[in-house]
Image (cartoon, helix red, strand yellow):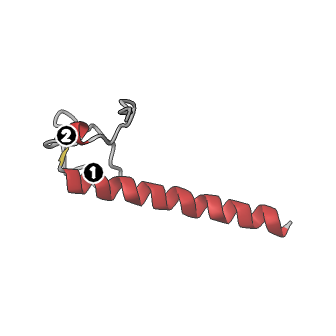
Amino acid sequence: MKKDNAALRDINNLKGPHKINLQLFANESANSPDEPKIYTREELDKLLQQEADRRVSEALKTAKVKRDK
């Protein structure tokens, strides 16, 4: 079976904490701009799921508005 090397969520890409420089507007004063937040795999998965849920909800609202016209 051919292994797909293009998968971003391959187990080799998920090992250890990852440094991700995300702009967080809700709590700007907690972290200085020079120190990026380090997320664990669980925190990163939670943030990715929240963003996916937000985008799906927005898409559903948009589709409903277009359907009701």
Please name the residue shown 79% across and 61% down the image: 66
- With respect to residue 15, does 65 lie above or below? below
The location of residue 58, given as percent across then percent down, is 59, 60
* The N terminus lies in quadrant: top left
Q: Indicate which disc, 1 or 2, sits on the residue closer to the N terminus.
A: 2
Q: Is residue 42 above or below residue 36?
A: below
Where does residue 34 sit, x and y in percent of width and height?
A: 18, 33
Q: Nearer the viewer, residue 35 or 48?
A: 48
Whether pointer 1 and pointer 2 mark residues with C-beta atoms closer than 8 Å, the reply is: yes
Secondary structure type for disc 1: helix
Residue 10 sits in which quadrant?
A: top left
Q: Is residue 20 left or right of residue 4?
A: left
The image's mark for residue 29 is none
Residue for point 19% across, 51% down? 30
Mark yes or no: residue 52 visible. Answer: yes
Q: Residue at x 39, y 31 (%)?
A: 6
Q: Position of residue 35 (x, y in %)?
A: 16, 37
Instruction: Specify few, some or many for label 2: CA neighbours under 10 Å numbering under 14, 14-19, or 20 or more.
Output: some
How far apart are labels 1 and 2 at the CA level? 9 Å
Residue on which disc 1 sits: 44
The kind of residue on which mark 2 rests is His
Check the image and name the residue furthest to the front. Answer: 1
- Tell me if residue 26 can be seen: no
Q: Residue furthest right?
A: 69
Q: Secondary structure at mark 2?
A: strand
Q: Which residue is drawn at the image coordinates 39% and 58% (left, top)?
A: 49
Q: Which residue is mark 2?
A: 18
Which image quadrant is residue 9 in?
top left
- Which kind of residue does numbered mark 1 sit on? Leu
